Image (cartoon, rainbow, N blue to C red):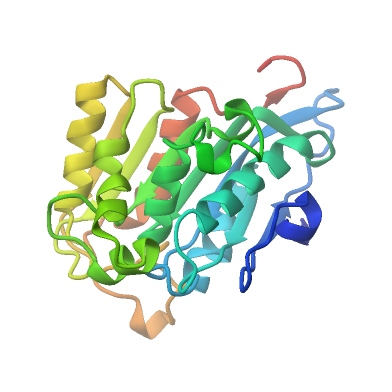
Amino acid sequence: MKIKCVDIYKETGLQKPEGAHAELTAYLPEMKELWGVKKRLRPAVLILPGGAYEYCSAREAEPVALQFTARGWAAYVLVYSCAPLVFPTALREAAAAMKYIRDNAETAGVDPHMVAAIGFSAGGHLCGTLGTLYDAPEVSDIGTAADIRPDALGLCYSVTLGGCPTHEASIHNISGGDPALAERLSIDRLVRPDMCPVFLWHTRDDGAVPSVGTLRVGVALEDAGVPFALHMYAHGQHGLSTADELVFPSYAVPETSWDVTGWYGAMIGFFNENGLVIHDEGVGE
């Protein structure tokens, strides 16, 4: 496994607001020659940790990346800028990260047409904006829509905003308390027919970010005709990440429904079904 960290602002030349910080860590598993195939290309995933737009949670970073690399994917974790910086700073950083992954795909053994983005909690909200605002004026100087648009999305117990119970701190931190901006950034209202396939999961008794927001996004995706899968698990606290000893001490793994730890396998399976697979060079182009 090769691990590489880059400063998004230094690496891409993105204009840096005062106080901003964005670091991208790449986890690249070895791709050995197999059965005479000299080069294989793999999908990549950009991981956006949660933290209420106050910080980036470590337990939703490397442990998630390792689940993807164990299955042959390239994984990239973005630590993005949080409060007091507001929209669109984090979105611009995520957009620049997507372009960086594609611009450097050849050296990483990545298929640039198979780059997913997944996010957790507030990072799920950021992921949702990345998957819908990829051609918005706020990111038009970073690259084309094709540079920025993810090929699949994974929204994990996501903050969605919207006219339903949600996580008020996340709303305030991303909008700076501007109700009009908060309304604009509601994921269910941003859903569009030409966005990529989406995998959503939540736990019904999440006490921090109510699951109704995920249900509303699912309805919006259905109405727009966007391919999606929605897994609503019966029981589990907020911030589960991989819900195992990778993120919690063995004596403190929280109680969950029996199937919650299967979310990442189900997500990768959904991504595979939608064309994001390891393949011989040229096959996926």
- Total numbered labels placed on residues in the image: 0
Q: Is residue 4 left or right of residue 133?
A: right
Query: Quick check: can you spot residue 74?
Result: no
Using the image as rendered, state which of residue 132 and residue 16 is in the foreground. Answer: 16
Q: Residue, x 79% and y 59% (percent of image)?
A: 10
Quadrant of residue 11 within the rendered picture = bottom right
Question: Residue 52: horizontal and vertical position, in percent?
Answer: 37, 69
Q: Residue, x 87% and y 26% (percent of image)?
A: 38
Q: Is residue 109 left or right of residue 188?
A: right
Quadrant of residue 276 within the rendered picture = top right
Q: Residue, x 48% and y 74% (percent of image)?
A: 55
Which image quadrant: the C terminus?
Answer: top right
Q: Is 30 located above or below residue 52 in the figure? A: above
Q: Is residue 157 left or right of residue 241?
A: left
Using the image as rendered, state which of residue 33 and residue 277 is in the foreground. Answer: 277
Query: Quick check: can you spot residue 30?
Result: yes
Question: Residue 284: horizontal and vertical position, in percent?
Answer: 66, 17
Question: Residue 105: horizontal and vertical position, in percent?
Answer: 76, 36
Question: Residue 277: horizontal and vertical position, in percent?
Answer: 59, 28
Which image quadrant: the N terminus?
Answer: bottom right
Q: Is 266 located above or below residue 281 in the figure? A: below
Q: Residue, x 75% and y 15% (percent of image)?
A: 282
